[in-house]
Amino acid sequence: MTTPKDLRYSEEHEWVKVEDGKARIGITHFAQSELGDIVFVELPEVGDELTIDEPFGSVESVKTVSELYAPVSGTVVEVNAELEDNPEYVNESPYEQAWMVVVELSDASQVDALMDADKYDEMTQE
C-alpha cells in the first residue's frame, strides 16, 4: 500500500490530516500490519485534551495492546464511534474508515514537525 502524500506522520505511526484548523488522526497502514488483527480500540471522549507525545488511547490486537500517542496537542472535537463496534476497520481501511479522533489544534506549528510521506516511508523501511 502506498503512503498517502497529503498526510503527515509521527514516529509512533500515527497519521494526521489537517482540515480547517483541525487534525484528523489515525494509525498508519504500516502500524496496523505490524499489530495484526485489531479486536478493540479505546479512544478518548469529546472534550478531552490531547498532549503531544502523550498516550490518548490504545488498540488491542490478537498479539498485543499498543498505546496511541498524540502526534499533536489539542481538544478532541470528534471521535470515530464506528470503531467501537467495527475495530476491524483499522486493518481494512486505516486512512479512510478508521480515523480515530479529530482535534482542534492548540498549536498548528506542531504539524510542521511531523514527517511527510517520503520520510515516513524511509523510516519504516529501515
Image (cartoon, helix red, strand yellow):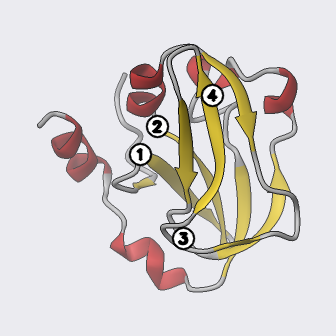
The secondary structure type at the circle numbered 3 is loop
State which tag comes first along the sequence, 1 or 2.
1
Q: Is residue 120 above or below residue 53?
A: above
Q: Check disc 3: other Cα within 10 Å, few if <14, some if 14-19, many if 20+.
A: many
Separation of residues labelled 4 and 1 (CA atoms): 15 Å
Q: Check residue 13 in the rendering and tell me which mark sits there, or answer none.
A: 1
Residue lying at the far front in this picture: please name it. Answer: 64
Question: Residue beneath label 2, please?
Answer: 28
Q: Quadrant of residue 78?
A: bottom right
Question: Residue beneath label 4, please?
Answer: 60
Separation of residues labelled 1 and 3 (CA atoms): 13 Å
At x 72%, y 26%, the residue is: 40
State which tag comes first along the sequence, 2 or 4.
2
Which sits in the foreground, 116 or 14? 14
Question: Residue beneath label 3, please?
Answer: 72
**Amino acid carrying mark 3 in the image:** Val
The secondary structure type at the circle numbered 4 is strand
Which sits in the foreground, 43 or 63? 63
> Where's the C terminus, which quadrant?
top left
**Amino acid carrying mark 4 in the image:** Glu
Picture coordinates of residue 119, whole percent (x, y) = 21, 52
